[in-house]
Amino acid sequence: MRVVEGPLQAPFVLPFEVQDLGMDDPQQLSAAGLGEVMAAASPEALEQVRIKYLGRQGLVTGLMRGLGALPADARRDAGARLNALKDALADAVAARGAELARAARAARLAGERADVTLPVSSDRVGRIHPISQTIDEIIAIFGEMGFAVAEGPHIEDDFYNFTALNIPPEHPARQEHDTFYLPERADGSRLVLRTHTSPVQIRTMRAQPPPLRIIVPGRTFRCDHDATHSPMFHQVEGLVIDRTTHMGHLKGCLIEFCRAFFGIEDLPVRFRPSYFPFTEPSAEVDIGCSRSGGELRIGAGADWLEILGSGMVHPQVLRNCGIDPDEYQGFAFGMGIERVAMLKYGIPDLRTFYESDLRWLRHYGFLPLDIPSPVRGPLR
Ligand code: DAH
């Protein structure tokens, strides 16, 4: 069947005079047929018209059947003309069908039309939790410095969580960690919920040859619960191992991070001698703040706030991972994610992070369609 492109033009012209057919009422039949085709308002209505004229019991089909009664001469001539009538109606049906399909598509597209330049209605989308947001920001900043993200299991054994990190069985740090232990195994050992992200340092150094530059954001667990402690919390660990890495790299990297994270270019950063079993020397990192008028403000001021622990990786830790400390050295750091999120976004109570309170999330959460940037203040 020939499909006629373009809108159907009325009147649709038959290629002959119907009365030439010499049969009852064909003129009326063709005019009526074409009229009904053009008037069909839906594909279903059009199909009904097609069946009425061209179907097996159709009117045109009936005329064709009547041809047999005509004398031979007249039959050939009338047959040709009836065929032309049938083709003309079929073409008209096809053309009208295409026109209806085009109109239906145009109507559907008009209904689906959306103005993508309109601003997002913030009440209709959910919010990104401040912990996820903070992790994204930390990854973005260290990502720009060439750090890759590494992960490790939440359930650890004693070796990765303590021993390989130079925390032997009787070491006081074990008590300080308020460890959650799993039930004793057949050999008397007990798995633990990792008390920090530092075991992933060990896993990474044992799995990949140096140089290494990784951060490890993830969940950690300690048996502790008050306004500043939760039994499940998050840390981000950092580890850099190379042949010539030194304390200057540690300081430069962490100063750069603190200033980028808090979005304060001249944020004072202080390195204070400290002790961790897995680093030597060790330093805690403080940022400048002021507490005048009972309000905490990050930036230049009279006070200091501790935000992370760091140090040069202890030679024994390197040896525990099969790395020769005479050839390689590096630095590591660890930071509490809730703590820096609370400071950056002014969230006063750590417990609220895990209360699943939608009003809290609407207040402190972030819009998923916001323009990404490493440094971003809360959206209201
Ligand atoms: N693991 C320490 C903690 O949970 C944090 C830490 C301090 C990690 C110093 C480090 C580091 O990698 O060098 O308190």
Image (cartoon, rainbow, N blue to C red):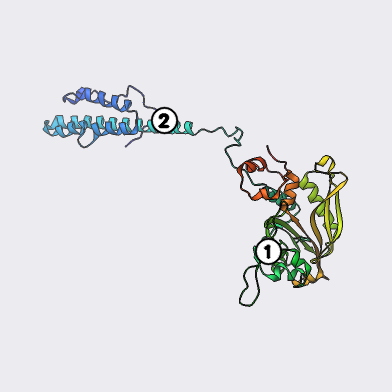
Query: Is the residue at mark 1 in contact range of ligand 1, meaning its CB lies under 8 Å from it?
Result: no
Measure the C-alpha gap from mark 2 to mark 1: 64 Å
Q: Considering depth in this image, is 253 or 210 the residue closer to the camera?
A: 253
- Please report the residue visible at 71 percent of the width from the left and 63 percent of the height from the top: 178
- Please report the residue visible at 70 percent of the width from the left and 71 percent of the height from the top: 159
Query: Is the residue at mark 2 in contact range of ligand 1, meaning its CB lies under 8 Å from it?
Result: no
User: From this viewpoint, is residue 194 visible?
Assistant: yes
Q: Considering depth in this image, is 321 or 294 the residue closer to the camera?
A: 294
Looking at the rendering, which quadrant does residue 163 occupy? bottom right
- For mark 1, what is the residue? 194
Residue 286 in the figure: left or right of residue 193 = right
Q: Considering depth in this image, is 227 or 253 the residue closer to the camera?
A: 227
User: Where residue 152 sits in the image (x, y, percent)?
Assistant: 66, 63
The label on residue 103 is 2
The label on residue 329 is none
User: Where residue 239 sits in the image (x, y, percent)?
Assistant: 76, 61
Label 1: element kind: loop
